[in-house]
């Protein structure tokens, strides 16, 4: 692995484990056993590291928020979308845990995130319209744009909700299981919109994704 990629990997690990605010470039260099000067050869500052990590996350999300070509959406596609989104949230959980601070600290990143967020909501609207067209969601009761906005708010705010309202001395750390409950939350907002044909399959998915919260 190239040194630049190793720096990104180490930074992501430390940001996720300790929070971006508590990690400096010196911490990253020390963690990797390199001099700060060697790190600065590849990245001028921490903001540049964060910007590149965001680029990786952005490309990952853009890649899986696509409607398949040549066929209608299926119930199984819902699980693929949601699993992919929450896998990304887990892998880059520092972004959403510290999002407001990160965007306030870097105007360029804030502009990029704004465009990214709008693009994701638009992709979500296209996916929800595809679910309507496939007869999975009821056309008369479904507002694809409202569902896309609500789902985006739920998914991007889930990490912050867990940190503010769920984590405590007994459960001090985020876990993949807690993020998995977010899949349940997104699915549960659609229960009243399902067509009867797919209701049993989606209700089975809801049972699979349910994780109790304290």
Image: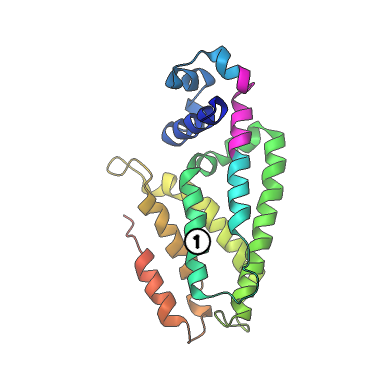
Q: Which residue is mark 1?
A: 82
Q: Secondary structure at mark 1?
A: helix
Look at the picture and state if 32 lies above or below 58.
above
Residue at the farthest left position: 170
Q: Which residues are magenta?
A: 41-53
Q: Is residue 193 magenta?
A: no
Residue beneath the point at 61% across and 78% down: 132
Q: Please report the residue visible at 68 percent of the width from the left and 40 percent of the height from the top.
A: 110
Image coordinates for residue 31, horizontal then vertical, percent: 43, 21
Residue at image x 72%, y 35%? Answer: 108
Hey, which quadrant is residue 106 in on the image?
top right
Image quadrant where one finds the C terminus: bottom left
Q: How has the structure been colored for display? A: rainbow
> 10 Å neighbourhood of mark 1: few (<14), some, or many (≥20)?
many
Q: Is residue 201 above or below residue 36?
A: below
Q: Position of residue 47 (x, y in %)?
A: 62, 28
The residue shown at (61%, 22%) is: 42
Give how far across and how far down residue 54 sits, in percent: 60, 40
Q: Residue 127 versus residue 111: which sits nearer the camera?
A: 127
Residue 51 visible? The answer is yes
Q: Nearer the viewer, residue 148 or 200?
A: 200
- In percent of width and height, residue 207 lies at 35, 70
Q: Is residue 143 visible?
A: no
- Is residue 49 part of the magenta span, yes or no? yes
Q: Tell me how many marks there are.
A: 1
Q: Report the magenta stretch's main SS.
A: helix
- Up the image or down, 87 lies above or below 19; here it is below
As drawn, the residue found furthest toward the bottom would be 196
């Amino acid at each position: 692995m190239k040194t630049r990629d190793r720096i990104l990997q180490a930074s992501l690990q430390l940001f996720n484990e300790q929070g971006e605010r508590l990690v400096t470039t010196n911490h990253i260099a020390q963690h990797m056993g390199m001099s700060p000067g060697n790190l600065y050869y590849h990245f001028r500052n921490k903001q540049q590291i964060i910007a590149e990590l965001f680029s990786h996350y952005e490309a990952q999300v853009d890649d899986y928020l696509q409607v398949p070509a040549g066929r209608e959406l299926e119930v199984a596609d819902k699980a693929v979308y949601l699993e992919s989104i929450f896998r990304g949230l887990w892998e880059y959980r520092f972004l959403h845990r510290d999002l407001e601070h990160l965007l306030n600290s870097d105007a360029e990143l804030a502009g990029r995130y704004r465009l990214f967020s709008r693009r994701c909501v638009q992709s979500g609207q296209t996916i929800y319209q595809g679910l309507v067209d496939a007869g999975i969601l009821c056309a008369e009761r479904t507002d694809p744009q409202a569902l896309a906005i609500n789902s985006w708010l739920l998914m991007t705010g889930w990490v912050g909700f867990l940190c503010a309202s769920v984590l405590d001395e007994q459960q001090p750390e985020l876990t993949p299981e807690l993020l998995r409950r977010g899949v349940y939350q997104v699915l549960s907002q659609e229960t009243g919109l399902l067509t009867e044909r797919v209701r049993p399959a989606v209700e089975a998915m809801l049972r699979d994704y349910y994780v109790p919260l304290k």
